[in-house]
Amino acid sequence: MISEYIANLKIKQYGGSFISCPSSWAATHVTSSYHKLYFPVSGEARITAKGHTHFLKERQLMLIPKGVTHSFSLTESCHLEKYWLHFTAYSEGTDLFSQFTDITVWDFFSDDMFTKLTGYFDQLFATERTNAVELSLLQQASLFQICALLFACSPEKIPSTLENAPLHSKKSVILKYIDEHLADSLTIEQLAKVVYMHPTAFIRYFKNRMGMPPLKYIKYLRLERAKLYLETTDYAIQEIASLTGFTTTSHFSREFKAAYGMSPVQDRKSVY
């Protein structure tokens, strides 16, 4: 059920703050492995994706979904003060924002909604709390409140898989196992044993529920996880290859370039 999906939901922040953007704030053809939120409180920005240019203004919230190639810069005013947030939101291998396939912009022009949203961001980026537990809980609460607000504004974007169907327990178990053993060598026989199935039946079961064979899914997940490490950490390429289950750095580099059209080093340099 939806309650079980939300109970297993993990929203992870990969960066964020309130900043006054320098005039040099610009980049072209950026593709991220996490979602981006921009919320200006003054000024204006130009964001282009899929041949369409958006002019993001104060009191507008923009979501740039992961995987959407985009370019950004300031407008002629050369002024932008904004909250920004990079994050992912997954439950049992399913992206909460899977229905968002293009840039989405919401208006928060009313004082009440503007105050509510800025309050969530301020709490998310606050650092002065009495203890680390309080700080962590408040930050996690803010992430959930921001996401809840987005779906309150766009209920049609709720993933269709959550409308009626309950989670499949076997699917939950196997996706959790893959996620926790991504650095290990994984075989069909090994995965089938986890859910007490014959390998042939397991392959059919997995493909019916995930839309791809298990080994293809594992490769996809390894590359996505590696891309996330490249863009959000300073881990060495060799370490990232090891953490994501690639036997050698050269093997990792070949697979990464085949999937994304650039080497791991080039991907890391492209992140702004």
Image: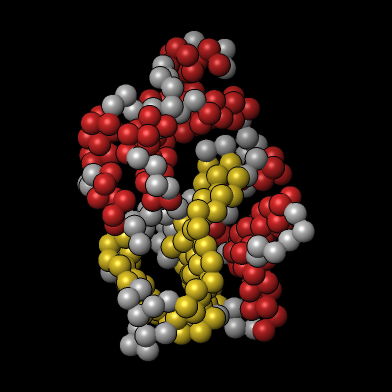
| Residue pictured at 74% horizontal, 50% vertical | 133
Q: Position of residue 36 (x, y in %)?
A: 47, 61
Which of the 4 image quadrants contains residue 183?
Answer: top left
Please state the total of marks drawn on the protein image. 0
Q: Position of residue 70 (x, y in %)?
A: 33, 64
| Residue pictured at 39% horizontal, 78% vertical | 22
| Residue pictured at 37% horizontal, 89% vertical | 77
Quarter that holds the N terminus? top right
Residue 79 seen in render? yes
Give the answer, above or below, for where 134 lies relative to 195.
below
Give the answer, above or below, for where 98 lies relative to 210.
below
Extreme residue in the bottom direction: 77
Q: Position of residue 249 (x, y in %)?
A: 27, 31
Specify how the rendered protein is coloured.
Answer: secondary structure
Residue 56 seen in render? no
Quarter that holds the C terminus? bottom left
Nearest to the observer: residue 149 or residue 163: 149
Which of the 4 image quadrants contains residue 226?
Answer: top left
Left or right: 77, with 130 as reference point: left
Nearest to the observer: residue 245 or residue 108: 245
| Residue pictured at 63% horizontal, 74% vertical | 118
Left or right: 97, with 143 as reference point: left
Q: Position of residue 61 (x, y in %)?
A: 52, 72
